[in-house]
Image (cartoon, helix red, strand yellow):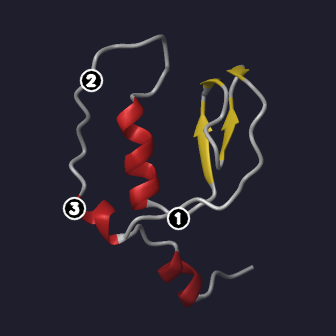
Amino acid sequence: MAVQQQDRKDARTLAPARKQVNLIASRKREHSRKPDELYDIVVRCSRPPFIELFARGPARPGWSVWGAEAEPAAPLGDVAVKD
């Protein structure tokens, strides 16, 4: 199935993502655990639904998780997106 031009335009990252610094400085945590700052950046810069790959532990509200050490995901709900 061909992707329509409108579909590609809707897939573009939100404006905050185009100005986002691509560096997070934080202390090392458990193996493959992401820095807490990452989640706010993803919510601010992307549209839902959100998924964390290689997750450890429980899902955050509004997020799905996938990984050998992930706990079952919370149902996807409304997530506030900041413009």
Specify whether 37 is left or right of 23.
Answer: right
The circle drawn on residue 19 is 3
Say which label, 2 or 3, has the lower sequence index: 3
Of circles 2 and 3, which is in front? Answer: 2
- Helix, strand or loop at mark 1: loop
Q: Nearer the viewer, residue 71 or 5?
A: 71
The circle drawn on residue 26 is 2
The residue lying at 40 percent from left, 13 percent from top is: 29
> Quick check: 10 above or below 77?
below
> Quick check: 16 above or below 26?
below
Q: Residues within 10 Å of mark 3 (few under 14, many from 20)?
A: few
Q: Amino acid at mark 1?
A: Arg
Image quarter of the C terminus: bottom left
Q: Position of residue 4 (x, y in %)?
A: 61, 87
> Quick check: 13 above or below 50?
below
The residue lying at 39 percent from left, 69 percent from top is: 14
Q: Position of residue 38 (x, y in %)?
A: 39, 39
- Helix, strand or loop at mark 3: helix
In terms of image quadrants, where is residue 73? top right
Say which label, 2 or 1, has the lower sequence index: 2
Q: Amino acid at mark 2?
A: Ser
